[in-house]
Image (spheres, helix red, strand yellow):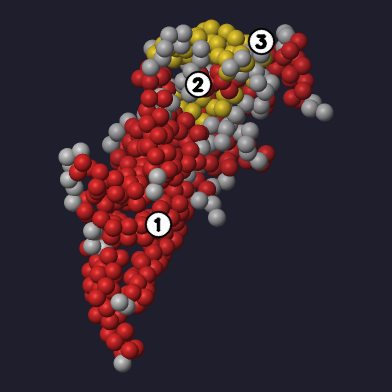
Amino acid sequence: MESGSTADLIRESLGPLLSGTLRGTIPLTVISFVLGLMLAVVIALMRLSPVWLISAPARIYVSVIRGTPLLLQLFIIYYGLPSIGATVDPFPSACLAFTLNVGGYASEVVRAAILSVPRGQSEAALTVGMNYPTTLRRIVLPQATRVAVPPLSNTLISLVKDTSLASTIQVTELFRKAQELAAPTYEFFTLYAVAAAYYWVICLALSFSQARLETRLDRYVAK
Amino acid sequence: MTEPTPPSDDVLLEVAGLRKAFGDNSVLRGVELQVPAGSVTVLIGPSGSGKTTVLRSLNALEIPDAGVVRIGEVEVDFSTRVDKRTAARLRALSGMVFQNHNLFPHLTVLGNVTEGPRVVQKRPPDEVRAEALALLDRVGLSDKADQYPFELSGGQQQRVGIARALAIRPRLMLFDEPTSALDPELVGEVLSVMKDLAGEGWTMVVVTHEMRFARQVADQVIFLDGGVVVEHGRPADVLDTPAEERTRRFLHRIIDPL
């Protein structure tokens, strides 16, 4: 009877948890990662600027993002913004917070990856007539990508799990869905275990994609 | 062996009063030189003599502190602030071959050669491709067009570097120790391509330690030491009967290192 009802509970939870994943966790991750990465490139380029007025704000930004808890950043945006008159719904608030967070962390990865491309590459680009933006786009960033993929995969995989924090500001994602389902039944262990399995499967899929992407990007590198 | 095209009187490249310091270290202390159109100039000199810095000043990879560089109609005075546009205008006139080739590893051999003409000069893709293939054929690598640089030997990589530099249709070609990073048995294939270019009448400035190349191909040898031109003239004069003691000592060390 007891084990039967647990099996039923798992079976009944699969659908709602999947919906929490597809409507909450995954869109939150994808939006925040894509926007965060764009922000990261901008911040990395700012930090690499020889002009102090450009590099200093980027430095401070990274320091603040890395030096404060993600949960706090989430709360400041969700609860703090209304106090200055800007009310934002839970989902966009979470997207904003995670984007800003990813932007800070990933900018350091992007910066290191850009610096890993030998100086001679930029010089060769200059001698075939390229200016700085074209050199970045055609020569430096494609090569930096290869270097950045493993650490950025780490960032992405962390982000998948960090989105569970959005449950604290009423975003219905995977973890919050598990909480909601568990509450009336008191079967916390079972439902959290199922939720954990969902997270793990997503991260497993990402790890596989990472390996495939790395192989693809390594095609021009001597083995 | 083809005779190098005799230099015309028309001076294509002119350098005057070139000065450059890295911190307290004065690398160039007023370098003067002239390169007639269609001639080959070889820069020699001990390590730290400033020969690479001179070469890199010719295409503004290095911005000298003072001095004038003129290539054709484009004259740049480095004693005033040189903006990016001016540097780019000067740079567009020369093709550069680097010691470590600096090929773009993520592009195929053909991609390396077409990158400048296609992306920067925005010439028609078909024309660029045909010209690039012809250039690769000229350096003996038409069968490697679709390979990546890492699949090539050092000598082949350097020949691609030459094709890439030629592809931007420069007025003169700069070579920065093009064979110094190569295994000895690969040096010949690169020098022979350079010799062919000289035979076709290309204006070339070459930093090298290959004295045989200087002797056979150069119209002018310039010996630099301590950031100044110590001696310059026809290869036979500078290499066989140097007027300056410093030149003699340098050549002696090169010919008989032990």
Q: Residues within 10 Å of mark 2 (few under 14, many from 20)?
A: some
Image location of residue B134, percent across then percent down: 41, 39
Give the CA distance from mark 2 to mark 1.
44 Å
The amino acid sitting under disc 1 is Ser
Image location of residue A220, percent across then percent down: 47, 51
Q: Nearer the viewer, residue B82 or A44?
A: A44
Image location of residue B53, percent across then percent down: 56, 20
Which quarter of the picture shows residue B129?
top left
Point out which mark residue B62 bears.
Answer: 2
The residue located at (22%, 42%) in the rendering is A81
Nearest to N terminus: mark 2 or mark 3? 2
Q: Check the image and report above or below for B225 versus A150.
A: above
Q: Quadrant of the N terminus of chain A?
A: bottom left
Give the CA distance from mark 3 to mark 1.
63 Å
- The residue where tag 1 is placed is A158
- The residue where tag 3 is placed is B230
Residue A14: tell me if it is visible: no
Image location of residue A69, percent across then percent down: 39, 48
The residue located at (38%, 12%) in the rendering is B73
Give the CA distance from mark 2 to mark 3.
22 Å
> Element under label 1?
helix
Which of label 2 and label 3 is nearer to you? 2
